[in-house]
Amino acid sequence: MRVYRPVGTVGPMPVLCFIHGGGWVLMDLDSHDPVCRALSNAAACVVVAVDYRLAPEARFPAAVDDCFAVLKWISEEAESLGVDSSRIAVGGDSAGGNLAAVMALLSKRDNGPSLVGQVLHCPVTDYSFKTKSYRDNSDGYLLTQEAMRWFWAHYLGEGSDGTDTLASPLQAESLTGLPAALVQTAEFDPLLDEGRAYADRLRESGVSVTYTEYAGVVHDPWLMFGVVPKGRQAVDEAGAFLRHRFDG
């Protein structure tokens, strides 16, 4: 793990459990260090970034287990961390958004920490390649359909079911009772439709949802926030959403 604290803050702080993207195979704490720093400042909160085990050396559900262990640790060790256990949120981008959504489901199902919000940026939500956005954005827009098939194959391996709720949260029987969500998608992203579908299902389940589709950008503008204005906007929107949830 890596812990970020806004400069000059004192007292028990709200905390975001952040889970990085990279198709469950790539990236790490360093790849998302700028994003974590930006979110910590934008949300005025502590950020605990999770360095979960990567596939294919550690296949599903290893990453799920690691992230849930950290989430529970944050709650249990809140005092020593200087955070407020009643103000915990989860968030992540792409495969990290998938794992953040799964953390919200697991916390409800297995009596985990009570969460005040979830931030899902360009999340993977379903093991399916049949959406219109997968057809329209299959190639030429940074993340490709071929790459997603490669990521899923490495993550699941042989014998794992991609429709398992802990791999495909969109397949969950019920999403009722989950924390309020911010779901962000990108126009030119194969994952656009499944992110929108997850936001729709959350809303239909009575969950408070803020949904934003960022026009004219490719997958994961968070990672480009230093050079892509809409990436900066997406980070700032996440920060504002989290501040609101922490203050609520």
Image (spheres, rainbow, N blue to C red):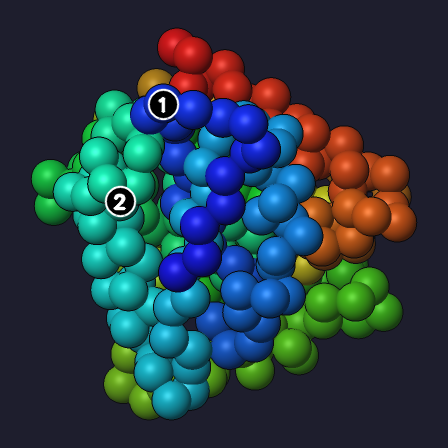
* Residue 228 horizontal/vertical position (percent): 87, 46
Q: Who's the residue at 72% across and 67% down the image?
A: 143
Answer left or right for 56 relative to 122: left
Q: Quadrant of the N terminus?
A: bottom left
Secondary structure under the numbered disc 1 in the rendered image: loop
Measured from the top left, where is residue 165 in percent x and y?
28, 56
Residue 129 visible? The answer is no
Q: Please, what is the three-letter code of the amino acid marked with disc 2?
A: Ile
Instruction: Name the outermost residue toward the left.
Output: 111
Do tag 2 and tag 1 residues touch (Cβ < 8 Å)? Answer: no
Q: Which is more toward the observer, 67 or 185?
A: 67
The residue beneath circle 1 is 11
Q: Which residue lies at the image location 38% right of the left edge and 68% below the top edge?
A: 52
Picture residue at 29% right of the left edge, 27% below the top: 84
Q: As rendered, which of 191 and 37 lies closer to the eye?
A: 37
Q: Which residue is mark 2?
A: 74
Tell me how far mark 2 sits from mark 1, CA to CA: 16 Å
Q: Which mark is nearer the camera, 2 or 1?
A: 1
Sequence-first disc among 2 and 1: 1
**What secondary structure is marked by label 2?**
helix
Left or right: where does residue 152 sit relative to residue 161? right
